[in-house]
């Protein structure tokens, strides 16, 4: 108990502030205790840690976004079909469709999600967050041919994997070794 009391006394001691002779300029400051100096030091450290955490968070977000975009680049040529020119020379993208317009990023994400979730328009709309299932279904009907080709390709690859998977080989246990039972009594 005495140790705690001594620590309080130590923290309450005034800290000497070095006085600089600034040619007649007098600075008035409230007396500083050791406790206030420790608090300032901890606050500076906390500020450094917070700024480091924010920098790390920004770095992680940019790395995650870069990873997502790298994964979507392989499908970019299929989605860019929307940018082809009509007979009059204007692209579909140039026309204003109100709330039915799709950004390049939304189209990439929707295409990727349709490959992943199949024809589950609710799941795709939930991932997008900016489109309704009806809008996703409309997008699907526009891109149906390309998406269906890739979906069929994935289904065939999955079926081939299932038929070629040897359950006995993969899950079979090695020949059981004889076990010696020892009585410890």
Image (cartoon, rainbow, N blue to C red):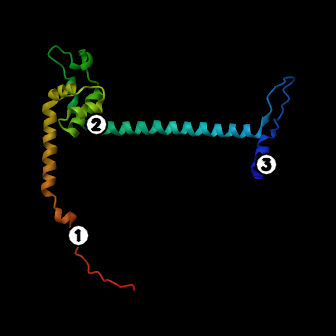
Q: Which of marks 1 and 3 is in front?
A: 3
The residue under label 1 is: 173
Q: Nearer the viewer, mark 2 or mark 3?
A: 3
Give the spatial CA distance, label 1 vs label 2.
40 Å
Graded by Cα atoms within 10 Å as few (under 14), some (14 to 19) or many (20 or more), the crowding at tag 2 reads: some
Examine the image and state in which quarter residue 85 appears. top left
Q: Give the x, y percent position of residue 174.
A: 23, 72
Q: Is 7 in front, or is 73?
A: 7
In primary-sequence order, the first of circles 1 and 2 is 2
Q: Give the x, y percent position of residue 8.
A: 76, 44
Please state the total of marks drawn on the protein image: 3
Graded by Cα atoms within 10 Å as few (under 14), some (14 to 19) or many (20 or more), the crowding at tag 3 reads: few
Q: Could you tell me which secondary element the residue under label 2 belongs to?
A: helix
Residue at image x 55%, y 36%?
Answer: 51
Residue at image x 24%, y 36%?
Answer: 113
The residue under label 2 is: 72
Question: For this view, does 181 lie left or right of residue 137?
Answer: right
The residue under label 3 is: 6
Q: In this view, does 103 lie above or below 47?
A: above
Q: Give the x, y percent position of residue 125.
A: 25, 30
Graded by Cα atoms within 10 Å as few (under 14), some (14 to 19) or many (20 or more), the crowding at tag 1 reads: few
């Amino acid at each position: 108990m005495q140790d705690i009391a001594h620590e309080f006394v130590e923290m309450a001691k005034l800290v000497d502030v070095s006085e600089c002779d600034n040619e007649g300029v007098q600075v008035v400051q409230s007396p500083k205790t050791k406790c206030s100096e420790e608090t300032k030091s901890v606050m500076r450290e906390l500020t450094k840690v917070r700024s480091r955490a924010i920098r790390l968070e920004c770095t992680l977000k940019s790395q995650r976004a870069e990873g997502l975009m790298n994964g979507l680049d392989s499908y970019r040529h299929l989605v860019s079909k929307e940018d082809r020119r009509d007979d009059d020379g204007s692209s579909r993208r140039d026309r204003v469709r109100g709330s039915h317009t799709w950004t390049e990023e939304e189209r990439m994400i929707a295409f990727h999600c349709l490959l992943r979730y199949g024809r589950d328009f609710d799941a795709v709309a939930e991932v997008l967050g900016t489109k309704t299932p009806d809008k996703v279904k409309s997008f699907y009907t526009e891109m149906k041919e390309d998406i269906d080709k890739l979906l069929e390709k994935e289904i065939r690859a999955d079926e081939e994997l299932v038929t070629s998977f040897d359950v006995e080989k993969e899950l079979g246990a090695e020949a059981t070794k004889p076990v010696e039972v020892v009585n410890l009594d």
